[in-house]
Every structure is written in structure tokens, then in C-alpha cells.
Amino acid sequence: MVQKLSNLLRFLLSSSESQSQIHQADIDLREACLVCGIVLIDSPLYKQLRVCPGCKFHYGLSARDRIESLIDPGSFKEINRSIASIGSISTSSESTYIARLSADQKRTGLYEAIVTGVCSIGGSPTTLIVLDFGFMGGSISAVVGEKVALAFEHASKRKLPIVAVLTSGGSRVHEGLLSLLQMGKITVSYERFSEKKLPLISVLANPTTGQAFASLANLADITLAEPGAIIGFSTARTIKESVGKSNDLAINNAESQLSNGMLDSIIDRTELNETLATLLDLTNPEFRLSYRKKTKRNQTPLPKQRAWQSVGLARHTKRPTSIDYINRIVLNFFELKGDRASGEDPAIVGGLGHLGGQTVMIIGQERGNENNDNVNDGMTSPAGFRKAVRLMKLADKFEIPVITLIDTPGPNQGSQSEMEGLGHSIATTMSIMASLNVPTIAAIIGQGGSEGALALGIADRVLMMQNAIYTAMAPEEAADIMFGKSTSNEEVAESLRLTAADCLELNMVDEIVGEPITAAHESPDAAARQLRRIILINLTDIGNWSSFRRSRRRYRKFRQIGEFTKIMGAQHELQKSPINYTDASMSNPSKVSGSKFHFQETDSLEKIDVQRHTDRRPED
Ligand SMILES: [Zn+2]
């Protein structure tokens, strides 16, 4: 890859020609591949899509060829075609600029470095924005900014999604500040468009740098890139300088930006049309689940099982993980990656998919198992939580339900996580989940470990698989901290009340999802079928509620958690002597109505059914 990038950079930087002239050489048919050297002239793949059949290097495409490669044949209608520049910001460079514009207009057949229009992709009506690197390096002139803004307004009015294919070197130097401020114009136009809850999908081709990267590319809801493309804020010139200093070539390419959390996916040009068709379908949901027949359901009583046995099954190395369930539960799953801030955490896997014909956002904690090669410890890092938050916000925008699959021993703790804001990322995840305006379902499928699990668990309905566990800490850890070495892990596990049956009894979960008699790891298909069925039933149920009702029920659900009793006369005693209050509760629990936990009485607590909480205690 480094060699390939090195060739690419040499290709982009070694010439003293203008960027657009370099690009023209790139667009013209080549005899042999610049990267791997194989003969290209007879390759249908190269002729049609400018992709080398040997090394898969993606050469440049003109805007017209790009449009032809993406749309349903004959569906493109250009809009705002004949808007052209009237000159540069400075009179001294006016004549040079006009000569350049006119030369590029003649050569490309375009008035400017952009083509906009409406089309259909995979049957979905779409607004298309395509930059052309062959016209003055795809730089953002006042006309480019204007046509982008007009495309946003056009799409808003017709409620159409937007696909933007970008290849741009950055700003139009001849237009100076006028060019720079197009980013402001693009941003305010995008915000108006985004308010209509419509998706912007950006595709970054080689190269996408500077203004285009810091506006259209990064404003997008979903960002794709072509393999090997130079992508980043820094321009080719800056990269050249950086290479000279540090010899570090692989900073700004699609592959490194994906691992830095800045992209959702890298898509080969041969698969781009199909990918966009799927994404447009998923982000523009037309269908919603409803009951064909609703039957009364009762939770089947489950056989009592020892807690330590549940711990073993929940941690079983062959137990299905999130990705195993996702692949069995949803269709057309498209994984979205990255937190757009610091990285891509493989311990969180999430994306869009169809469940019973309805689009859902499904986000799972992934630990990997013996059946797949993505083995990690399943501990979610701050980047993982931020990715989950990003996907939840997308779901909220597209008005689609969120389903979380919980399976983690806990959050990824340590100095690196602390520096990246672990506490803040957990708090934000819970806060966003609590405030979503769409139906939310959380399913604990394996280990529901501590804050790492709860962060994805603030949902309208919380499900738990029969052999999963939900606990504030691992039994081994609890044995160390609370019980001393003499207590066995089995006894500690029992006292933690971490089984599905315990959690249902304690009202920590709403429903248990039964597993096959041999447990999920022996029959993953049967386990997934059962989980899918229960998710569908619950989703149909809460999907019919108004968002006001959902919000009120979600509030009550988590507001009521806790065990306490009302202390008669305690307020009076507290006012007299706060020290006595503390001493009394610590030294002689019988004085506070025999309850282990107690809360100061407030007006809002009065409204809660206190009696319901007085007769259950953790050690019951
Ligand atoms: Zn090649």
C-alpha cells in the first residue's frame, strides 16, 4: 500500500503542470497502469470505470462519466447548468483567470467544476452534486458554492436526498476570500436541507482535500470513499512538504481516514451504484411495522438456573455475538463506521438494515468469537461510545427505531480511555439514548457488564436473553471487593442477582428472550429467530405510540428504579440533627423502618408508588 501511495503521490506532485492538466492526463486512456504496470488498453473495467483490473487503482473520472456510472440509465436531468463566473476578486489577475476558465470550459465542455441535477439511483429519486477535478482542480469557486446551495434548496423543496461525489483540491485561489466564504454558504444551505430530515451521502474520490473535505465531505450523514483516494484537509502541496519532513506517506488516504474514524466505508467503484441504491433505500424509510394479528402473550416461566452457570454461558467463547445476530436478524445491513473524532472502535458494530421491511439502526457491542475473526475483548472505548451516539443521532434524524445489542464485560478502562474522555462518552451515550424521539429497544445478549452495558440500555424496552447476565461488576471482582477470598465465585454470582430471571423479578428488564434448550451457542439460528421475533413484537408495540407517550414512559421507567421506604418523621429529625440521622442509619438500621436504602422525602417522590418498592430488597 505504501508503494502504491508513493506512486500516486509522485503522479500527483512530480509535474509542474496545473492540477487540471494532470487530471486530464489521468482521464485520457492509458496504455499501461501507472501503479502496477499491466496493460490497460484492452480492459473493459478500465474503459468503463477507469479501474485497473490488476491493482484496482481508481483513476479519475470526469463528472459526466461519473454520473453515467451511478444513475439509472437516462434518468439524469441537469439543473442550473449555465451559471458561469464573471471573474476574479482582483483586477490584476483578471485576465489570467478568465483565460484559464475559458481553456477549461473548452476542454471539459463544462461551464464550471460542478454538475448538479436530479436522477434516480436504484429507483430512488435523488439530487446529485458532482465535482469535476478536470476543471481547475475541482476547486470551490463562487459558482460552485452557488450551485451547491441551489441543489440543497432544490432537494429541500422536493424532499429528495442528496448524493455528492467529490474530487477537489481545495479553494479557487483566483477568487480569494470569495472562494473561502463559499464554505459558509454551503454550510447554511446544508443546515436548511438537514432540517427536513433528508440524508446527504458523500462519496470522496481521489483527491478530496481542503474546502470540499471540510464542508460537503464532513457535513454528510454518511461518508464513503474510493479505495486509495487521497482524502484529508491538507492539500497535495502540504502533503508533499510533510512527506519531505517525516516520510510519512499514509496520513491522508481513504484507508487511514477509515481507521481514524472519519469515514463510514471504502467502496470499490464497481460496487458504488449498488451501495448508493441500498443506502438511499435505507435512509428514506417508506414502511413501518404493524400487527397482522396481535395475540396476548405471557412470559413463559423459565427454569431456575444457577447464576454461575449463566455466567459461564454468557461468556462462552462460541456464544453468538452482536454481528452473528445482526446478520441473522436484519436484511441489507450496511455497517457505518467511525466517531468522526478520534477513531474506529471494532468493539461497537452498527449500521442500517431492514427488519420486517422497516429500516432500523442496529448497534451492538462486539467481542468477537471463535466463529468470526473480529476477536477483541468487547470493552467499549470512548470512540465506540461516540460512534454509537453518532448512529443514534442519525436514526433520530431519519426517524427510524434504534436497537442496541448489549454484550460487554465493561467499558475499556485505562489511561488512554481517560484521556479520550471515557466518562463523558458514557454520559453522552446515556443522555442521547434517553432523549431520542424514536422507538428504542435494548437486548442484553451476553454479558451486561456495568456502565459499559447500561450506556446502551436506556431504552423503551429492555430485553434479556435467557442465559445472559446483567451486573454492576463481575463476580470475581465482587468477591475481591465485597466478600473476601473465602467466598466462592459461585456464591458471589448468586448474591449479585445477575441472571435473566433475577433481573426480570427486580424489574430491571421487561422481557426474557428464551434460548434453545442447548443454549444459544449450540443453536445460533434458533436463538436469533427467537430474539428477532421478540424485538419485532416490542417494536410494533412501541412504534404505535406517540413520541410524547414514549418519552413519558421512558422517563417513568428509569425514574422509578430504586428501593426505598418512607421514613415517618425523618424530615423533622433531620432538621434537628443531621449527624444523628447519618449515625442512626449506619449503626442501627432497625431505626429506619428496616430498610437498607432510604431517601429523603420530596414532593416528586410522593407521586411514586412507594409501597411497591418497600417489600423487595437486593438480598431477598
Ligand atoms: Zn494497476
Image (spheres, rainbow, N blue to C red):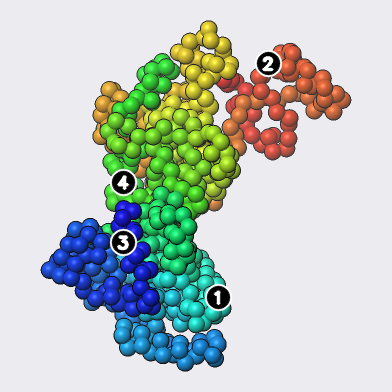
**Element assignment for label 2:** loop
Quote the CA–CA distance across marks 2 and 4.
49 Å
Please say if the residues under marks 3 and 4 sit with CB atoms less than 8 Å apart: no
Q: Check mark 2 vs ligand 1: CB closer than 8 Å? yes or no.
A: no
Q: Quadrant of the C terminus?
A: top right
Q: Earlier in the sequence, mark 1 or mark 2?
A: 1
**Is tag 1's residue or tag 3's residue first in the polypeptide sequence?**
3
Quadrant in the picture for residue 176: bottom right
**Please, what is the three-letter code of the amino acid marked with disc 1?**
Leu
Tell me if I can see residue 178 in this picture. Answer: yes
Q: Read off the residue under disc 1.
A: 181
Asked if residue 548 lies left or right of residue 148, the reply is right
Q: Please give the residue where the numbered disc 4 appears in the rendered image.
A: 330
In this view, the mark in front (3 or 2): 3
Q: Is residue 184 left or right of residue 163?
A: right
Callout 4–callout 1 Cβ contact below 8 Å = no
What's the residue type where badge 2 is placed? Gly
Q: Which residue is mark 2?
A: 594
Gap between marks 4 and 1 measured at Cα: 43 Å
Real-space CA distance between mark 1 and mark 2, rounded to the nearest whole angstrom? 68 Å
Judged from the image, the secondary structure of the residue bearing numbered disc 1 is loop
Discs 2, 4 touching: Cβ within 8 Å: no
The kind of secondary structure element at disc 3 is helix
471, 59: nearer the viewer: 59
Q: From the top left corner, tell me how far across and down residue 480 is, in percent.
A: 55, 16
Q: Position of residue 465 (x, y in %)?
A: 38, 30
Residue highlighted by disc 3? 7
CA separation, marks 1 and 3? 34 Å
Label 3 to label 2: alpha-carbon separation: 77 Å
At a point 35% along the width and 50% down the height, the residue shown is: 335
